[in-house]
């Protein structure tokens, strides 16, 4: 669903409207399908506004990615900090800190942000893809935490299992859920996000032997 507030809320300044409109349109339609004209029309601003406020459409999309990824990683970091209060932390609590922020989107704006990030992973522009490939700082924190919780696993084995966990976590787009519903003849649906989170934690924890 495209957030109408991004277009209709005149109290939001034009720069923020461009941010929200581009995010909502890309989340709904994909990076390749959304033009500069689409974004400015949706935001209710003139065609030159993107260049004025962001320099280019590419820079606008990169700004959105950086902002939303930073928000997600901050929330993960806060949950991880809470999970590391014991000398030997609980592996499931660490996995919950990694997974929960990507599953539990309480507001429409949050769900749009997560859909944007999900699309960025598979179809984002080169600048975004470069960040995804090379910036592993936040993931290293989780690898280090899991090493504390699971000292019997050597580093290579632990990172492999974290890698596969991320694969399961990222396989949660709208198309994935539509296929799941069809495959299960309606028995499996993602509507109960709390139940979905617990299933995913159970699955990934089993991969770590906990």
Image (cartoon, rainbow, N blue to C red):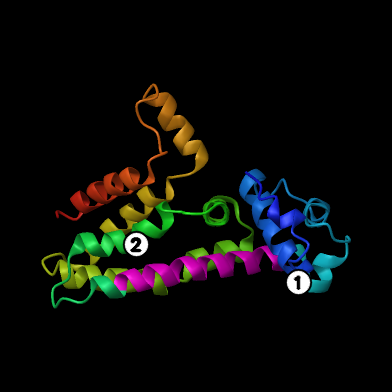
Whether residue 108 is situated above or below residue 47 in the rendered picture: above
In which quarter of the view is residue 166 placed?
bottom left
The residue that appears at 59% across and 51% down in the rendered structure is 123
Measuring 89% from the left and 61% from the top, which residue is drawn there?
A: 46
Which badge, 2 or 1, comes first in the chain's sequence? 1
- Relative to the observer, which residue lies in front, 195 or 28? 195
For disc 1, the marked residue is 54
Q: In screen coordinates, is 117 left or right of 84?
A: right
| Quadrant of the rendering where the N terminus is positioned | top right
Q: Name, please, the residue furthest toward the top.
A: 185
User: Relative to residue 183, is residue 86 depicted above or below?
Assistant: below
Q: Which residue is mark 2?
A: 98
**Residue ID at (33%, 49%):** 197
Secondary structure under tag 2 reads helix
Residue at 39% x, 21% y: name it.
185
Quadrant of res 76: bottom left
Furthest residue in direction left, as rendered: 152
SS of the residue under disc 1: helix
Over which residues does the magenta segment extend? 59-80
Query: In the image, 101: left or right of 48?
Result: left
Residue sitting nearer the eye, 63 or 163: 63
Residue 107: % across, % down: 52, 54
Q: Mark 2–mark 1 contact, CB under 8 Å?
A: no
**For the residues marked 2 and 1, what is the alpha-carbon distance in whole angstroms?**
31 Å
- Crowding at dot 1, Cα within 10 Å, few <14 / some 14-19 / many 20+, comes out as some
Verify whether residue 70 appears in magenta.
Answer: yes
Residue 47 versus residue 200 in the image, above or below? below
Report if residue 1 lies within the magenta region.
Answer: no
């Amino acid at each position: 669903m495209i957030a109408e507030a991004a277009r209709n809320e005149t109290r939001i300044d034009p720069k923020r409207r461009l941010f929200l409109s581009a995010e909502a349109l890309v989340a709904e339609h994909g990076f390749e399908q959304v033009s500069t004209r689409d974004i400015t029309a949706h935001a209710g601003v003139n065609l030159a506004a993107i260049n004025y406020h962001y320099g280019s459409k590419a820079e606008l999309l990169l700004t959105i990615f950086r902002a939303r990824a930073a928000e997600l990683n901050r929330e993960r970091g806060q949950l991880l900090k809470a999970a590391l209060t014991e000398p030997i932390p609980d592996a499931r609590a660490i996995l919950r800190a990694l997974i929960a922020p990507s599953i539990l989107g309480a507001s429409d704006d949050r769900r749009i942000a997560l859909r944007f990030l999900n699309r960025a992973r598979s179809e984002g522009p080169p600048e975004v893809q470069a960040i995804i490939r090379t910036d592993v700082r936040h993931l290293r924190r989780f690898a280090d935490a899991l090493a504390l919780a699971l000292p019997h696993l050597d580093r290579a084995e632990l990172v492999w299992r974290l890698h596969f966990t991320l694969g399961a976590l990222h396989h949660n787009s709208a198309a994935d859920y539509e296929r799941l519903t069809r495959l299960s003849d309606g028995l499996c649906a993602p509507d109960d996000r709390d139940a979905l989170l617990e299933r995913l934690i159970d699955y990934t924890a089993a991969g770590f032997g906990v």
